[in-house]
Image: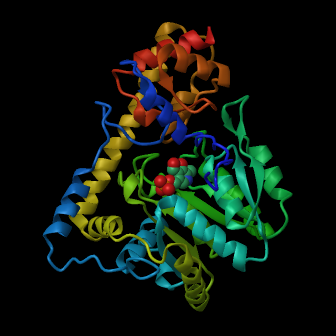
């Protein structure tokens, strides 16, 4: 008899489980709007042209070997990643006060940052938005931090609960860590305006709260890499410290390559150096060192002006397709006379629309229309196409009438 005979069956992951259910459905009309992965107008995964080009260069270069990377990852990749998020002219980079380590995509960067904080920071409470990406509370709890929520979304306006956010951060203990989505907040698609960001920044700096930015969608929200990094750069410009976790899953379509970076902006170069030395002690017993392939692709693209430009064009095309899906879905609901205000479909930003549909309505749409989405009513706009918009609009219409 097995030593694990009594082990309990674990529940499916709330997000990845949607795809499991979708795969089991034999219906030809099924649509998967669960996981946040980009699809073409034909519903296919997309490998960017510039990524294919970079891979060709890597394959044809006989000097490329499969040796271990250092614990901190590929040095070029780390420099270029910090530059991408903080800006080419960032004083923090020029003054050598940024410690950057290559990590296993966005999730791994959050986890390494969380473990570092649990070991070395005096405040072990992290405030995360309500709601947030479902993995956040688990990642930070297991990293050894204690998770609390701040108000973020107001269901009444389907917009930012700015007053609640300011109140909750205002009453957080001084020094607490605050997780902020750099842009394209997941799952709500609701971001603060630049003016609101600035007020958040002033409040946080005045209370000594430590910003931890999660940047999983740079370039994906607006189509501009710089515009989508403004929140982070505003917090660097005031000279204060911050954490930033970057993912190349969405903006370079490198999902399964697991490539990302954690940057810690410090006040001084000698601090950054010691911080990096401690990050190595976090990483070494976890996975020794990160994988080489994805980071080599990213570094190849970021350091070549021509490839970088090609990337920005392909990135903008993905962002634009998502924006056009918002317009098509909103038009389709208007044409059907679907009751309710659906203007948030256009107003929200990034990969997702937080529809406002409740759990029963979502279950109805899955059962009757074979549309798969998370039970909180979040749909991935990147999984939609002109072909599937009418079907989704029919389903929403039926669900709310
Ligand atoms: N953070 C947010 C807000 C996300 O939505 C995601 C992916 O869905 C991630 C982080 C991390 O993704 P990955 O680990 O694939 O880079």
Q: How many numbered marks are there?
A: 0
Outermost residue toward the front in this view? 1
Near-viewer residue (309 or 9):
9
Judge from the rendering whether residue 300 lies leftward or rightward of residue 225; answer left or right.
left
Which quarter of the rendering shows the C terminus? Answer: top right
- Can residue 91 be seen at all in this image of the molecule? no
Judge from the rendering whether residue 267 lies leftward or rightward of residue 152; answer left or right.
left
Q: Quadrant of residue 201?
A: bottom right
Residue located 83% across and 68% down the image: 174
Near-viewer residue (93 or 179):
179
The relative height of residue 203 versus residue 27 in the rendered view (above or below) is below
Residue located 31% across and 80% down the image: 67
Q: Quadrant of residue 31?
A: top left
Near-viewer residue (10 or 356):
10
Residue 135 on image: x %, y % = 61, 51
Residue 264 on image: x %, y % = 57, 75
Near-viewer residue (60 or 310):
60
Judge from the rendering whether residue 70 lies leftward or rightward of residue 125; answer left or right.
left
Residue 188 on image: x %, y % = 61, 39
Residue 362 on image: x %, y % = 60, 23
Please name the colour scheme applied to the rendered image: rainbow
- Can residue 253 be seen at all in this image of the molecule? yes
Q: Quadrant of residue 376?
A: top right
The relative height of residue 55 versus residue 29 in the rendered view (above or below) is below
């Amino acid at each position: 008899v097995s030593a694990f005979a009594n082990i309990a069956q674990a529940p499916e992951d709330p997000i990845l489980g949607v795809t499991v259910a979708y795969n089991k459905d034999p219906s030809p009309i099924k649509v998967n709007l669960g996981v946040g992965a980009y699809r073409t107008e034909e519903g296919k995964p997309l490998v960017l042209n510039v990524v294919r080009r970079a891979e060709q260069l890597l394959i044809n270069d006989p000097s490329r070997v499969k040796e271990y990377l250092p614990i901190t990852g590929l040095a070029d990749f780390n420099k270029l990643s910090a530059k991408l998020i903080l800006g080419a002219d960032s004083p923090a980079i020029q003054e050598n006060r940024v410690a950057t380590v290559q990590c296993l995509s966005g999730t791994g960067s959050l986890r390494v940052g969380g473990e570092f904080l649990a070991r070395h920071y005096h405040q072990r409470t992290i405030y995360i938005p309500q709601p947030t990406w479902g993995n956040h509370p688990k990642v930070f709890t297991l990293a050894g931090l204690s998770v609390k929520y701040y108000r973020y979304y107001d269901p009444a306006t389907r917009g930012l609960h700015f007053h609640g956010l300011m109140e909750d951060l205002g009453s957080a203990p001084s020094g607490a860590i605050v997780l902020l989505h750099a842009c394209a907040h997941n799952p709500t698609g609701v971001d603060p305006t630049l003016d609101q960001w600035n007020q958040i920044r002033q409040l946080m700096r005045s209370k000594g709260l430590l910003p931890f930015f999660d940047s999983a969608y740079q370039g994906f929200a607006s189509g501009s890499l710089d515009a989508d990094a403004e929140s982070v750069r505003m917090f660097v410009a005031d000279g204060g410290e911050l954490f930033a976790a970057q993912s190349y899953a969405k903006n370079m379509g490198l999902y399964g390559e697991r490539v990302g970076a954690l940057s810690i902006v410090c006040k001084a170069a000698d601090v950054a150096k010691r911080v990096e030395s401690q990050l190595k002690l976090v990483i070494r017993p976890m996975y020794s060192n990160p994988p080489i392939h994805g980071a080599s692709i990213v570094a190849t693209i970021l350091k070549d002006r021509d490839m970088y430009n090609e990337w920005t064009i392909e990135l903008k095309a993905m962002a634009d397709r998502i924006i056009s899906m918002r317009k098509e879905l909103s038009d389709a609901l208007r044409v059907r006379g679907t009751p309710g205000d659906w203007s948030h479909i256009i107003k929200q930003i990034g990969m997702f629309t937080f529809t406002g549909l409740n759990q029963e309505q979502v279950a109805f749409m899955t059962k009757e229309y074979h549309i798969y989405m998370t039970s909180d009513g979040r749909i991935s706009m990147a999984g939609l196409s002109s072909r599937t918009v009418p079907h989704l609009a029919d389903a929403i219409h039926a669900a709310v009438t």
